[in-house]
Amino acid sequence: MEGIWLTRSMACQNIWPNIRLSFSTVLAPCRHDVVISQNLSQEIVEELGIYIVSFDRAGYGESDPNPKRTIKSLAMDTEELADQLGLGSKFYVVGYSMGGQTVCLKYIPHRLAGATLIAPVINYWWPGFPRNLSTEAYNLQLPQDQWALRQVILKSSLLKIFNFSLSLQGDKHTSHKYFQQGAFESNHRDMMIGFGSWEFDPMDLQNPFPDGEGSVHIWQGDEDRLVPVILQRYIAKRLPWIQYHELQGGGHLFPLLDGMSESILKALLLHKEVTSV
């Protein structure tokens, strides 16, 4: 299914048809590989009554590039797609990795029934981080990844030719589907936006559910080599209204573990505490 927009097209896919559960990202990211739905059984789908929609973000897969893409535009894309598909006044969002940014919490909190961020990528230069902590986290990254991030800050033209090791690599056929618009319009533009200058500090976010009508979750593996757990822990302390779930021994791909999708969705939809996975 494709939703035709005012100025460009966005490719999307309905995965499980029932209630309103809208996914703002996919693994790597591509609508054909939605990390949260890969290991869901039909029994769990029927129990939860879920309706999952995934889409290729701008510049990925079959969605048109957006040369004017900003931090805010991902939230606006999510809202417009929900309206085009008639998902109602409120819906859930689940974002993973680079697509798990906090933008929907900032720009469309009134449209959310709940939100889950899975190993969301963190900007080391958000002003709310103590400098010593963000420096420590930055230094934990591989040298080539540190170099790539420095180029983002310098806005170097090298971004157009550098193949970031931060990208999730798949087989040749899969990678071609993800990046058929070109690496610059997808992966590289993501990096420039995500690690560039933001117009708000996520540490200043307000609870979108002050009356407890919904919930916000962060899921993080403590051995994630792409997203430093020390920064995720700091965010959880600064924003205590976020329900923080840390998986011992979990890396960046922990959502693919057996039982994880079910645990993540039940925590969001049924408000069930997760004691073990």
Image (cartoon, rainbow, N blue to C red):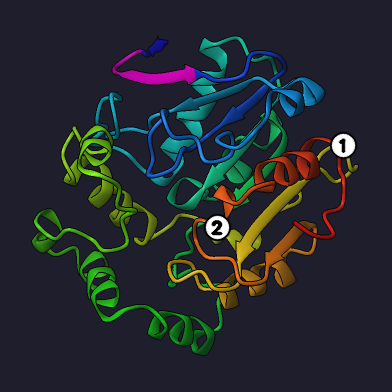
From the top left corner, tell me how far across and down residue 271 is, in percent.
86, 43
Q: Is residue 148 above or below residue 263?
A: below
Disc 1 residue type (three-letter): Glu
Q: Nearer the viewer, residue 67 or 187?
A: 187
Choose top left, top right, bottom left or bottom right for residue 88.
Answer: top right
- Magenta: main secondary structure equals strand
Q: Does 155 appear in magenta?
A: no
Query: Within 10 Å of the Cα at label 2, are there few (<14), some (14-19), or many (20+) other Cα atoms?
Result: many
Q: Is residue 65 above or below residue 232?
A: above
Question: Of helix, strand and loop, which one carries label 1?
Answer: loop
Q: Earlier in the sequence, mark 1 or mark 2?
A: 2
The quadrant in which the N terminus is found is top left
Q: What's the residue at 50%, 27% (across, down)?
A: 54
The span from disc 1 to disc 2 (Cα, nearest Å) is 24 Å
Q: Which residue in the structure is indicated by mark 2?
A: 119
Q: Which residue in the structure is indicated by mark 1?
A: 213
Q: Is residue 205 visible?
A: no
Which residues make up the magenta segment? 6-13
Q: Nearer the viewer, residue 106 or 17?
A: 17
Q: Does 10 appear in magenta?
A: yes
Q: Is residue 83 above or below residue 23?
A: above
* 19 left or right, relative to 82: right
* 182 left or right, relative to 26: left
